[in-house]
Structure formats: C-alpha cells, structure tokens
Image (tube, helix red, strand yellow):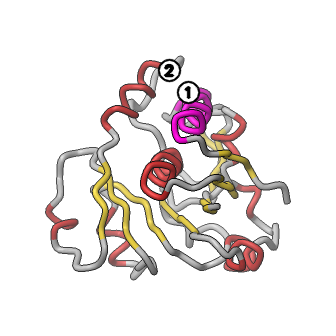
C-alpha cells in the first residue's frame, strides 16, 4: 500500500495527521503540503515528494527533503535547478498521460493535470503497489472543478474555479487503476 496526501479542505481540523504518519508504507506528498493546516491534520512524514520542474526550487528552499526520493516531471522543459539536486531523483515522463488527459477534458482550461494526479500515476508505475490510499483529494475524487477549495499554497487560497478538469482526472484514476492493477481509494475521516 501507498498513501498519497493531498491538500483538500477535508484535512483541516480532521486530526488524521498521526494516523497518516503511522502507516507502515510509503507516504507521498506534493504541492505545498505544509501550508493550510497543521501537522495534527496532515501529518509530516515524507517518503516521496512529487513536483514539477517549475516548482522544484520551492521544495528545496523549504527544505522539504523526502526520506526516499523526489519524483519530478517536466511541464516546461526546464531542468536547470533539478540538475543541481544531489539527492535521489526520479525524472518521470508523463507525456502519454497528458495526452490521455487532454482527450478526456470536457472544460476549457489547463492542458496539464494536477500534481496529485501525477503522484498517483508515478506511484502506480514506479512502486507497483497493490493499493493506493488517498487523503485530501476532495475535488479530484469527486470529479468537481467548480467551487474548488484548497489548503495548498496557491496564491488563490480558498474557493475559486480551478483550471484543472477534475472530472477528466477522476476518469484517469480509473484508467491508472486498471492499467497498473492497483486499487485506488479515498480515506474516510
């Protein structure tokens, strides 16, 4: 099993942080997870960190160094800062998955899926788990892009309309599940 922790508002005041950190399996984090709620709600353990080449510097600056490996994927063909990183690093090629996403999109917006979706894909491909358990993937799991809410570090904190097509991303979860023979579920808390 692998646990991937997002930054959905359901984490706030949930008290699930110790539960998340206590799992005897890898914990994957992404996208400014330390903002928006405390350790008691989100946990603090980071075994794998998933980020884009564009946001990689922020994680290094915040001293978010995972215990096992950084997963970085390219959204802008810019690897300068990634190349300077001396820790364990995996460069993921998500080109095929971006094409699948674009083919599933029903709303205009970003032609890139969210980092949570990237973390699901990379975890399934790289670690071959039997199951992936998600925490704080509220919008993606519901397939809901309207009235998007986040605890993340976006400059648009709070409620807004995201450019991601979470209905398309939710369909991708099922495709990932089938392709990698992995059971993907969202935690109840």
In the image, taking residue 129 as reference, residue 88 lies left or right, namely left
In this rendered view, identify the residue nearer to me: 69 or 107: 69
Residue drawn at x 37%, y 61% as measured from the top left: 71
In the image, taking residue 47 as reference, residue 92 lies left or right, namely left
Above-or-below relation of 97 to 17: above
**Spot occupied by residue 120 in the image (x, y as percentages of width and height):** 53, 49
In this rendered view, identify the residue nearer to me: 22 or 107: 22
Count of numbered tags: 2
In the image, taking residue 57 as reference, residue 98 lies left or right, namely right
**Spot occupied by residue 142 in the image (x, y as percentages of width and height):** 72, 36
Picture quadrant where residue 1 is located: bottom right
Q: Which residue carries the number 1 mark? A: 168
**Spot occupied by residue 79 in the image (x, y as percentages of width and height):** 17, 58
Residue at mark 1 to residue at mark 2: CA–CA distance: 5 Å
**Spot occupied by residue 23 in the image (x, y as percentages of width and height):** 70, 74
In the image, taking residue 95 as reference, residue 136 lies left or right, namely right
Q: Which residue carries the number 2 mark? A: 104
Write down the region rendered in magenta.
165-180
Pointer 1 and pointer 2: residues touching (CB < 8 Å)? yes
Tell me, yes or no, whether the highlighted magenta stretch contains residue 174: yes
Instruction: Give whichever of discs 1 and 2 has the lower sequence position.
Output: 2
SS at circle 2:
helix
């Amino acid at each position: 099993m692998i646990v991937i922790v997002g930054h959905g508002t359901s984490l706030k005041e949930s008290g699930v942080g110790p539960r998340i950190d206590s799992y005897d399996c890898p914990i994957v984090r992404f996208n400014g997870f330390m903002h928006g709620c405390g350790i008691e709600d989100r946990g603090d353990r980071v075994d794998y960190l998933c980020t884009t080449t564009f946001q990689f510097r922020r994680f290094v600056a915040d001293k978010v160094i995972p215990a096992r490996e950084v997963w970085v994927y390219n959204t802008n063909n810019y690897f300068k800062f990634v190349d300077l990183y001396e820790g364990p690093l995996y460069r993921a090629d998500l080109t095929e998955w971006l094409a699948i996403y674009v083919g599933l999109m029903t709303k205009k917006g970003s032609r890139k899926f969210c980092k949570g979706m990237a973390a699901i894909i990379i975890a399934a491909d790289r670690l071959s788990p039997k199951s992936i358990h998600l925490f704080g993937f509220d919008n993606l799991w519901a397939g809901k892009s309207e009235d998007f809410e986040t605890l993340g570090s976006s400059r648009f904190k709070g409620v807004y309309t995201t450019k991601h097509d979470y209905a398309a991303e939710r369909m991708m979860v099922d495709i990932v599940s089938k392709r990698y023979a992995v059971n993907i579920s969202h935690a109840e808390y």
